[in-house]
Amino acid sequence: MQATDAPTTSSLDGLIDLEHYPIHDLDGESGRALIQRCHAQLADDGCVVLKNFVPADALARLERETERLSPDAHYNQTETNPYNNAGDPERPASHPLNRFDDRTNGFVAGDRIGEDTIIRQVYQHPDFQRFIATVVGMEEIHQYADPLADLVVNVLREGCQHPWHYDTNEFIVTMMTRQSHGGGRFEYAPGIRSPEGESFEEVEKVLDGDRSRLKALDLQPGDLQVFFGRYSLHRVTPVEGQKERHTVIFAYAKEPGFIGRPERAQRIFGRMAPIHETLLKEGMNRTDSLAD
Ligand SMILES: O=C(O)CCC(=O)C(=O)O
Ligand SMILES: [Fe+2]
C-alpha cells in the first residue's frame, strides 16, 4: 500500500460551506477577513450568526440527524428567574429577581450522537475548534470529557421555551437543525447588564414587554451561532405548532478534561454516565472551574 499524507481527521468538505467560511485556512486572506467580521459582530453585540454554515446540499441530512435523535430527549421542567437563583423575598414581586417563568426543555445526550453524524464530525474537527477558539479570543478550546454534555441536542416541542435569562457560561456555540412553524424565536437585549451593574430597572422593562432594546434573530437550519450570554438577557419564545425546534449545543472548555456535575447530568439527561457515578462515589471535592 502506498503511504499517503492524508490528514488523520475527517474532511469538513461538504459539511461546512468552506468557500464562504474558510475555517480550514484561517491564515489565508479570506480566512482572516472572516475572523475580522466575526470579531466586529461580537464587539458590536456579543453575537455572531453564520448563515448557511452547513451548505444546502447537506441540510436534509442534518435535519434528519436530530429528527432521528429527538425521541431520545429527556425533558425536565423548572421554574426559573433570569438569574437562575432562588429570588429575593425582600423585594417586590415585580422585581426581576422574583420573576419566575416555565422552562421545559428536552435534551438528547452526547452518547446518543454517533461518530458518523455531521454534528459530531464538526464538533470534533480541529479546524472547527481552532476557528471557534479564534472567534472567542481564546488560545485553545477543548471538547468536554463528559460523554453526556459534550454535544447535546436541545429539543423544544410545542409550548417549550427558554424564558428570559443570562448564561453562566461565557459563550455558547449552537447550530439550528430544525425550526418550528411558529415561535421558537431567539431574542436578546445586548449588553443590558455589565460587570458594573445589574440594571434591574431596564431588565424589568424587558420582562414587562418593552421591546425597544431587543434584537431578534431569524435562525434557520444550518446557521451557526456564537453568543456571549452573560451580559445579554435573552430568550427563545414558546414553540407553536407540531414541528419541534432543534438546536445542537457544541460544548467546549478552556481546559481539557471537563466533566459536569453528576447531579446536573441526572437533572438534564435523566441519568448519569459511568464517569459521573464514579465521581459521585469518590465524592467530588472539586473547587475548580465548574461551569455550573
Ligand atoms: O437555543 C437557543 O437558541 C439558545 C438557548 C439558550 O439560550 C441556552 O441554552 O442558554
Ligand atoms: Fe442562554
Image (cartoon, rainbow, N blue to C red):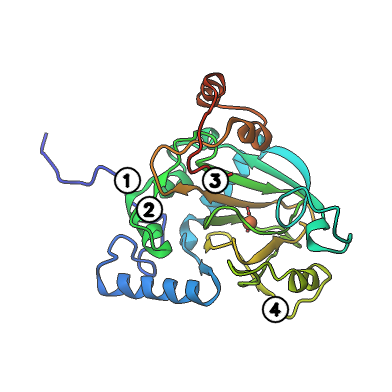
- Residue at x-position 67% and y-position 47%: 155
Q: Which residue is mark 2?
A: 129
| Disc 4 from disc 3: Cα separation | 29 Å
| Disc 1 from disc 2: Cα separation | 14 Å
Residue 188 versus residue 82 in the image, above or below: below
| Disc 1 from disc 3: Cα separation | 30 Å
Q: Nearer the viewer, mark 2 or mark 3?
A: 3
Q: Amino acid at mark 2?
A: Gln
Residue placed farthest to the top in the image? 281
The image shows a total of numbered marks equal to: 4
Q: Amino acid at mark 4?
A: Arg
Q: Nearer the viewer, mark 1 or mark 2?
A: 2
Label 2 SS: helix
The residue lying toward the viewer, choosing from 4 and 237, is: 237
Query: Can residue 84 be spotted in the picture?
Result: yes
Q: In which quadrant of this rendering is ligand 2 seen?
A: bottom right
Q: Nearer the viewer, mark 1 or mark 3?
A: 3
Q: Amino acid at mark 1?
A: Ser
Q: In the visual, does 85 lie left or right of 254?
A: right
